Image (cartoon, rainbow, N blue to C red):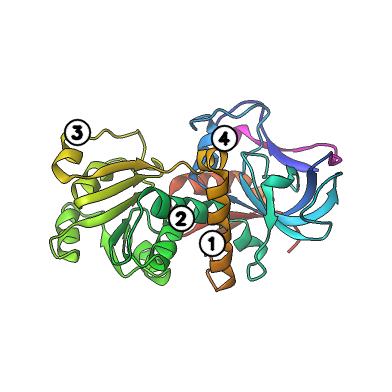
């Protein structure tokens, strides 16, 4: 089997395609022939050693893939050989085969292509957890999504709308804002201009926003928090824009507002039943027509370019690598 691997954490140039023996699944394991892998900012951050959890070495990037079951170990009660599935795990997916525990594997939505299925689960799960469980967004509230054209931002736009929010999509280019409108945003915000808060105030009739969904951080962080309405909630997803920002402690006090975090990895570990219920809701929406847009497509041999694109914030949707024959 071929996999992208490195003996040290670092930039894309530290990684190479290597050959390894095809493993045999043991008890509770499945061997999946990978058709597509998606990469987000967090995947490249983990590969570089900058993620909050340091992965073991040698490291194979990629936390989400789609493919077909080709072998099954003893006592597997779920997917069977030839089933189309989605794999979600901390690393190991950027390969032409992946050995996964049954709990890391779920059925692939029938309505999706392999490319779509490889890029939806973690983003949709993060968006639903952040908006429903953490922010407890209410129907009719105004939701500001920062980085609205990225993978998780797009998921927040789509799911925010399904939860009944009025969605304002913030993005730094006209192409990204048009893309966010295509995904269901009601209004758009250009936060690349100097006085974008005045623009946001006008969009909300001076009331501010109820919820901020923030995978960006950086210089937008404090300004977005200051744009909350009374009782608003600012949910932190990540820090694509760079160093972790700080917030003056008086701002939550003055606004009666809350700063919240949404860590999907820990949510699955510590609240497994709630996470499973969210997965069922997402699958139901997918059956009803919820579709993730596929971002930039790369061949397996171009994995370094794909990693660079995933870390740059330029892709519309999540970066996807085609692994299987097409």
The residue positioned 23% from the left and 57% from the top of the image is 209
Q: Are marks 2 and 3 in contact (CB under 8 Å)?
A: no
Residue 291 vertical position relative to residue 261 in the rendered view, above or below: below
Q: Residue 21 colored magenta?
A: yes
Tell me which corner region of the image, top left, top right, bottom left or bottom right, holds residue 281. bottom right
- Discs 2, 4 touching: Cβ within 8 Å: no
User: In the picture shown, does residue 59 fall above or below 324?
Assistant: above
Q: Which mark is residue 47?
A: 4
Mark 1, other Cα within 10 Å: few <14 / some 14–19 / many ≥20: some
Where is residue 91? Give x, y as percent: 63, 39
Task: Report the Cα–Cα distance between label 1 and label 4.
Answer: 31 Å
Closer to the chain start, of discs 4 and 3, is: 4
Q: CA distance from mark 2 to mark 3?
A: 28 Å
Say which mark, if any, is on residue 128: 2
Front of the two marks 2 and 3: 2
Cα–Cα span, label 2 and label 4: 26 Å
Query: Residue 165, position in %: x, y?
Result: 33, 65
Q: Observer-nearest residue: 104 or 256?
A: 256
User: Where does the C terminus fall, quadrant-wise?
Assistant: bottom right
The boundaries of the magenta stretch are 13-26
Asked whether the residues under the numbered discs 1 and 2 touch, taking CB atoms below 8 Å apart as contact, a structural biologist would say: yes
Residue 100 belongs to the span the image colors magenta: no
Residue that label 3 marks: 248
Residue 157 seen anywhere in this rendered image of the structure = yes
First along the sequence among labels 2 and 3: 2
Residue 281's disc is: 1
Q: Nearer the viewer, mark 1 or mark 2?
A: 1
């Amino acid at each position: 089997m071929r996999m992208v691997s490195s003996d040290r954490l670092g930039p894309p140039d530290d990684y190479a395609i290597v050959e390894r023996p095809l493993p045999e699944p043991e008890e509770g394991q499945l061997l999946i022939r990978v058709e597509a892998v998606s990469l987000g900012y967090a995947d490249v951050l983990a590969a570089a050693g900058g993620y909050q959890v340091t992965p073991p070495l040698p490291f194979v990037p990629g936390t989400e893939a789609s493919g077909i079951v080709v072998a099954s170990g003893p006592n597997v009660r779920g997917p069977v050989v030839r089933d189309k599935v989605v794999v979600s795990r901390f690393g190991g997916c950027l390969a032409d085969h992946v050995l996964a525990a049954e709990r890391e594997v779920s059925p692939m939505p029938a309505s999706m292509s392999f490319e779509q299925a490889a890029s939806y689960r973690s983003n949709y799960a993060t968006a639903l957890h952040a908006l429903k469980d953490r922010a407890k967004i209410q129907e009719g509230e105004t939701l500001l999504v920062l980085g609205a054209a990225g993978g998780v931002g797009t998921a927040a736009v789509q799911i925010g709308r399904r939860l009944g929010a009025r969605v304002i999509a913030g993005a730094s280019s006209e192409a990204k804002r048009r893309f966010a409108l295509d995904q269901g945003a009601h209004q758009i915000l250009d936060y690349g201009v100097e006085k974008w808060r005045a623009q946001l105030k006008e969009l909300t009739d001076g009331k501010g926003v109820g919820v901020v969904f923030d995978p960006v951080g950086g210089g937008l962080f404090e300004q977005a928090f200051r744009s909350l309405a009374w009782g608003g909630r600012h949910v932190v997803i990540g820090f694509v824009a760079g160093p972790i920002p700080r917030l003056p402690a008086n701002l939550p006090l003055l606004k009666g507002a809350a700063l919240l975090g949404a860590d999907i990895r820990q949510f699955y570990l510590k609240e497994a039943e709630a996470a499973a219920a969210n997965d069922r809701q997402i699958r139901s929406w997918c059956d009803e027509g919820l579709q993730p847009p596929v971002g930039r497509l790369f061949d397996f041999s171009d994995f370094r370019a794909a990693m660079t694109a995933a870390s740059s914030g330029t892709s519309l949707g999540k970066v996807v690598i085609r692994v299987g024959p097409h």
